[in-house]
Image (cartoon, grey):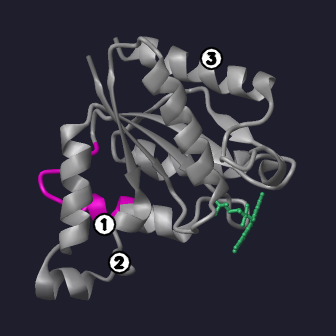
């Protein structure tokens, strides 16, 4: 059994990526995968913009350490990221950078599935490709398949649930594939 942490990499209250990761968590919680899933909120880990002077003067901030402990305890992560200007959002990269400063390095060997959501037609797919680069460079095994939800502003009902059964099925299929891979 693997322990999997799940998080939307946006701080926005009504974030489409938060909604997508909530749907993924619901789907997995209803599944009989045998794995353990924990949904985290990125807002619970507020951290400054990385500055080596902050690190030198006061060490790694408490909220970075707190997130680091969650990652240490997990075998795998499922993250849903927005796309900003064709790449991963700064807050996501900043968190990866801060956590990479914890010694010993805790990223190597972690398994990661990337999801994304955007109101645009490409469904954050460029951000998914971009997010792989720093994560793979610090030893994370990023699952080859990813899922990008396009037209995300129209994808959820008033309860935040995915409206389209075919989309839900695609997400479910990929989540199951990733869970089987973790066995
Ligand atoms: C600075 C900035 C740049 C953006 N660039 C892109 C982009 O390149 N591609 C895209 O599909 N959406 C882009 N968007 C729109 C985001 O996809 C949209 O704000 C989305 O709601 C963010 O994800 P969230 O809902 O999870 O917060 C951009 C938004 C901002 C604020």
Ranked by sequence position, the earlier of labels 1 and 2 is 2
Q: Quadrant of the N terminus?
A: top left
Q: Quadrant of residue 146?
A: top right
Mark 2 lies on residue: 50
Q: Quadrant of residue 12?
A: bottom right
Label 2 CB less than 8 angstroms from ligand 1: no
Residue at image position (54%, 43%) is: 21
Number of numbered discs overlaid on the protein picture: 3
Mark 2 in CB contact with mark 3 (< 8 angstroms): no
Ranked by sequence position, the earlier of labels 3 and 1 is 1
Whether residue 62 can be seen here:
yes
Q: Look at the picture and state if 166 lies above or below 138.
A: above
Residue at image position (18%, 51%) is: 69
- Residue 87's x, y, as percent? 65, 59
Mark 1 in CB contact with mark 2 (< 8 angstroms): yes
Mark 3 in CB contact with mark 1 (< 8 angstroms): no
Mark 3 lies on residue: 173
In this rendering, would 2 be left or right of 120? left
Ranked by sequence position, the earlier of labels 2 and 3 is 2
| Observer-nearest of 51 and 73 | 73
**Which one is closest to the eye, mark 2 or mark 3?**
3
Residue at image position (73%, 50%) is: 158
**Which one is closest to the eye, mark 3 or mark 1?**
3
Q: Element under label 3?
A: helix
Residue 98: numbered disc: 1
Label 3 CB less than 8 angstroms from ligand 1: no
User: What is the magenta range?
Assistant: 96-107
In this rendering, would 183 be left or right of 59? right
What whole-number distance in Å separates the C-alpha atoms at marks 3 and 1? Answer: 33 Å
Residue at image position (33%, 20%) is: 35
| Observer-nearest of 46 and 131 | 46
- Residue 39's x, y, as percent? 39, 44
């Amino acid at each position: 059994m693997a322990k999997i942490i799940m998080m939307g990499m946006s701080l926005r209250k009504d974030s489409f990526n938060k909604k997508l990761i909530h749907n993924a968590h619901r789907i997995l919680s209803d599944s009989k995968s045998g794995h353990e899933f924990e949904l985290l909120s990125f807002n619970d880990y507020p951290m400054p913009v990385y500055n080596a002077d902050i690190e030198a003067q006061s060490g790694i901030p408490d909220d970075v350490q707190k997130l680091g402990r969650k990652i240490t305890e997990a075998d795998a992560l499922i993250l849903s990221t927005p796309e900003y200007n064709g790449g991963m959002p700064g807050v996501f990269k900043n968190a990866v950078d801060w956590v990479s400063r914890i010694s010993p390095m805790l990223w190597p060997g972690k398994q990661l599935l990337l999801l994304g959501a955007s109101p645009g037609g490409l469904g954050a797919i460029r951000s998914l490709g971009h997010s792989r680069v720093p994560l793979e460079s610090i030893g994370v095994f990023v699952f080859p398949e990813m899922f990008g939800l396009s037209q995300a502003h129209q994808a959820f009902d008033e309860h935040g649930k995915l409206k389209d059964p075919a989309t839900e099925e695609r997400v479910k299929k990929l989540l199951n594939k990733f869970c089987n891979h973790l066995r």
